[in-house]
Amino acid sequence: QPSIVKGRTDVVAVTPWLAPIVWEGTFNPVLLDSIYKPKKISIAVTVFAVGKYIMFLKNFLETAEQHFFVGFNVHVYVFTDRPKEVPEVKMADGRQLTVRLVPSSKRWQEISARRMELIQKLIDEQLRKNSDYIFCLDVDSKFHDRWGTESLGGLVAVIHPGYYLDNRSKFPYERRSASKAYVADGEGDFYYCGGAFGGILEEVYLLASTCRFNFEEDAKNGIEAAWQEESHLNRYMWINKPSKVLSPEYLWQDFKARNPEVKTIRFSGVIKNYADIRPNV
Ligand SMILES: CC(=O)N[C@H]1[C@@H](OP(=O)(O)OP(=O)(O)OC[C@H]2O[C@@H](n3ccc(=O)[nH]c3=O)[C@H](O)[C@@H]2O)O[C@H](CO)[C@H](O)[C@@H]1O
Ligand SMILES: [Mn+2]
């Protein structure tokens, strides 16, 4: 029997615009799965593994098999310039992988930021036929615990683990008013990750096409936002509030000690040596 007076009291589980904030202990996974199972939903995942980042793909895919929407239809789209190096990972029934070729680049900022354009194109060319939801994830990361139906929503954002205890004046939003990613002092709700977002196709389509457009407008004016597409995503989420927010359990960082309110880590960024893996520093 669900209680309406007892629950997590150490964290906030709903935003001021009444979107759930998903933390361990705020949902019943069995109940949620039983709601979504009969709907036969399909979930698309995009992951970019350009240049040396291909080395992260095996772990990402193997741990996704263990923890990401287990028992549901999942279609992983791998974007890479090294198709021959895509690892063979055994996938369960109902799960599949497609490789999409992308050009390499000399700048990591461009690889990261161009994801929005390629996500927009993927939705246009492929996904409307076969997917209900999409999640867009960083490849330099691993799953450790369940990421499932509790994360589904219209527009879904993940709170960045590095800033969730800070005042918004400390958030690394783009602060130059000339940029289309600008967030003024005293504005902004949370600081969200560029490394994980999702939702229903049409919502993510709007997000990706808007961020792409704004990124290209900035480029015309010789501006690159402080954190590339992450800055544009944060601006977008301030204007268009996410309908579901995932706690930092959904994208922790391996180098960070776990705080007491974080009861489980579901997905986290691995420790990496930037100088070794990025095409530029
Ligand atoms: C956890 C998180 O929220 N990470 C965000 C953060 O830094 P990160 O340090 O996590 O960025 P990153 O180096 O992981 O790059 C983002 C992603 O772009 C892809 N990639 C990048 C470089 C490359 O040479 N090859 C390649 O494939 C890859 O999928 C990678 O995971 O800020 C970036 C700003 O640009 C992005 O918003 C990241 O999503
Ligand atoms: Mn990353």
Image: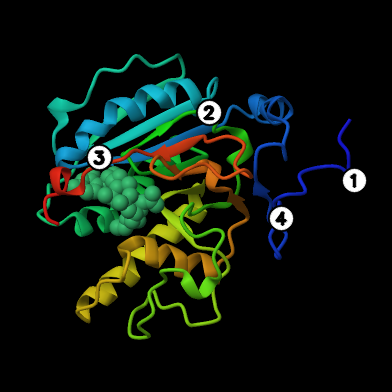
Compute the Cα span from label 4 to label 2. Answer: 22 Å
Tag 4 and tag 3, C-beta contact below 8 Å: no
Cα gap from disc 3 to disc 2, whole angstroms: 25 Å
Q: Quadrant of residue 78?
A: top left
Which numbered disc flags the more N-terminal residue, 3 or 1? 1
Residue at label 2?
A: 145
Question: Can you say whether 131 is above or below 13 in the image?
Answer: above
* Vertical order, 164 against 69 (above or below): below
The residue under the point 48% across, 28% down is: 144
- SS state under label 1: loop
Categorize mark 2 by other alpha carbons within 10 Å: few (<14), some (14-19), many (20+): some
Per the image, label 2 sits on a secondary structure element best described as loop
Decide which of tag 3 and tag 2 comes sooner along the chain.
3
Which residue position holds label 3?
A: 79
Label 1, residues with CA under 10 Å away: few <14, some 14-19, many ≥20: few
How far apart marks 4 and 3 lie (CA) works out to: 34 Å
